[in-house]
Amino acid sequence: MTQKRYTIQANGIRQYVVEAGEGPPVILLHGFPETNYAWRFQIPALADRYRVIAPDLRGYGETDKPAAGYDKRTMARDIVELMRALDIPKIALVGHDRGARVATRFAKDHPHLVDRLVVMDNVPTRIVARDLNAAIAKSYWFFLFHLVPDLPEALIAGREHIWLRHFFSDWTFDPGTITGEAFDTYVRAYQAPGAVRGAMADYRANAADLAQDKADADTKIACPVLSLWGNDFHAVGKLFDMAKVWAEMADDLVAVPIPDCGHLPQEERPEIVNTLLLDFLAPWKG
């Protein structure tokens, strides 16, 4: 399967995109601490039926890392303008982690542009804040650490491999899942100038994200939603009733835990995830 890699100017930033396949468009939005490389197992599987588009989010990978614009409304607008630049009128949207926050905001702000939504291993910002207690704070320590201005960048510089090794070991069912070429690829991405700052800026938009989420808390996502999560991740599946969490967000909901899986279902259990995605996306005809 031939993959195209290119940059395109959209919403005032240069966005880096991997694309493959033809058919109804499906956009994949990665999370932290990743880039669009996270979708390397999904892109070929989906590209047999769909036009698959996987951008690096604002602040991540090869996409621009401007000083501002990391609230999820602006990041969702990045995707709207990417669609406009590519002449795509409507999509199915898949988001993991931070990408799921962008995708959720996209679905609420632009319901006419999305046919169906997949959210992977994500508890919405508003619900994390609302339910915050000592146990949640322990698992979400990095939310708070990443909010501190400048200090994370200073401590992580030159130690990106240590910082990333912690997350990839702690967040996976098998701590050896992300090793070798995959780990080296992510380390290189976060060693790039501005890359750690870009990821921190995503987290530092938390107050704005929370305000946006509270403003339309009573508005359910209009399209069909598939929520997937790793059954064994201490910060999501083990800590929240995920079916109940996403029932607050959407009425047309399919909620599926992935067994023997941590925070990275698309990388830890790609065969299961690909089967679930293809089944859920099947009605999307473009």
Image (cartoon, rainbow, N blue to C red):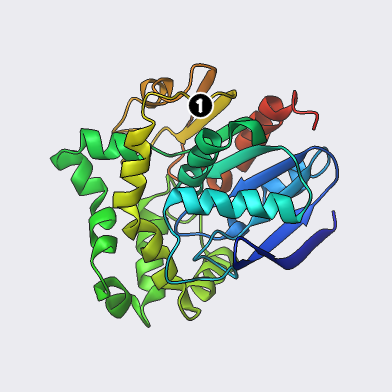
Examine the rendering and report whether any part of residue 214 can be seen.
yes
Does residue 165 appear anywhere in the picture? no
Residue at coordinates 65% horizontally, 53% vertically from top-left? Answer: 81
Q: Secondary structure at mark 1?
A: loop
The residue positioned 47% from the left and 48% from the top of the image is 73
x then y, percent, for residue 35: 55, 60
- For the residue pair 281 and 80, the one nearer the viewer reads as 80
Camera-side residue of 233 and 29: 29
In the rendered image, the residue lying farthest to the left is 134
Give the quarter of the image for residue 89: top right
205 over 286 or under it: above or below: below
- Number of marks in picture: 1
- Report the residue at 79% width, 40% height from top: 50
Residue 117 drawn at (x, y percent): 59, 32
Mark 1 Cα shell of 10 Å, populated few (<14), some (14-19), many (≥20): many
In the rendered view of the protein, which quadrant contains the C terminus? top right
Residue 196 locus on image (x, y percent): 41, 71
For the point 40% across and 59% down, the residue is 202
Q: x%, y% of residue 36?
A: 61, 58
Residue ID for mark 1: 221
Above or below for 172 versus 90:
below
